[in-house]
Amino acid sequence: MKYNHARRGFQLVIVAVLLAPVTAQAHLFHFAGLQMQETQMARDFRVVKELIEWRDKYFDVATEVYRGEVRRRVPNPTEPGFLLKARYQRTFPTPPLKNLAQQLDDRYGTAIDPWIEARLVARDEEGVKAGLRVLFYFHIREVLDALVSHEERPPVVRQLFGVLTDYLFTAFEIHLALTNRPTYLQVKDTLEHLREAAGLTDPPTPRPDEVRRLRTRLLSLLARTLDRRIAPVVPS
């Protein structure tokens, strides 16, 4: 019973501090007039990241979030209650992080899920985040491929670019800014040029060939930062 009360109080703290709505202005990859498209995958990542970065290191709850046993839902001002809900209480638009990692492991021969599970047990904060960065790399790759495929549909391109900036901010921006400043600046510069080549500036001047070149450059920059024990082969 004492555990349940403590857990309930902890969830209230999450509601008040951890899970406040994310604003596009909060990061350096934001562009004027372009809304960041926050995804469920990014919401789950942020919860895991914050839980294991806190002084008390809530790896047990982070494991539940990773496995999808509790997840962050989109805040609704008219609906009271916790922002962390048990799986049976809420339908989510994407599978939990663990399922996504397992899918990538099956598809690419990576070891994302066993790595993250082992790092959670070991209470290894940096190891968990390294595993999740590999997961986000592959999803960034898929978003960039979709960006190329839908280059003639400006509304779709704009939405995809919003998802791309959300993924980069969530998994890479702070990490690179603190640990690899040269790569961070190159990623930021490449993203700015990609926005221009995708026709998201005023006036719009789409350059499909340049989009393809910048896609390859961005993926190459990110791939250099990944732990190859988790993903020995990283397709670009």
Image (tube, rainbow, N blue to C red):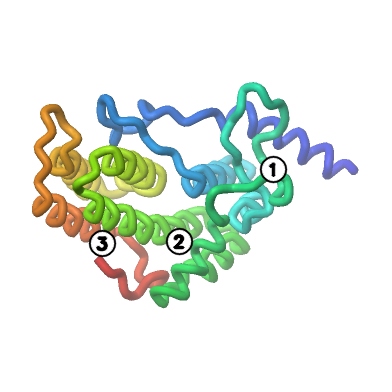
Is there a contact, CB below 8 Å, between mark 2 and mark 1?
Answer: no
Q: Residue at x 79, y 38 (%)?
A: 6
Does residue 234 appear to the left or right of 66 in the view shown?
A: left
Does residue 103 appear to the left or right of 204 in the view shown?
A: right
> What residue is disc 2 on?
131
Q: Secondary structure at mark 1?
A: strand
Q: Which mark is residue 224?
A: 3
Q: Secondary structure at mark 3?
A: loop
Picture quadrant of residue 196: top left
| Badge 3 density bin: few <14, some 14–19, many ≥20, Cα 10 Å | few
One can see residue 178 in this view = no
Q: Position of residue 153 (x, y in %)?
A: 24, 44
Q: Residue at x 29, y 36 (%)?
A: 29
Q: Is residue 119 above or below residue 159?
A: below
Q: Residue furthest top?
A: 78
Q: Residue furthest right?
A: 1
Q: Is residue 31 above or below residue 181?
A: above
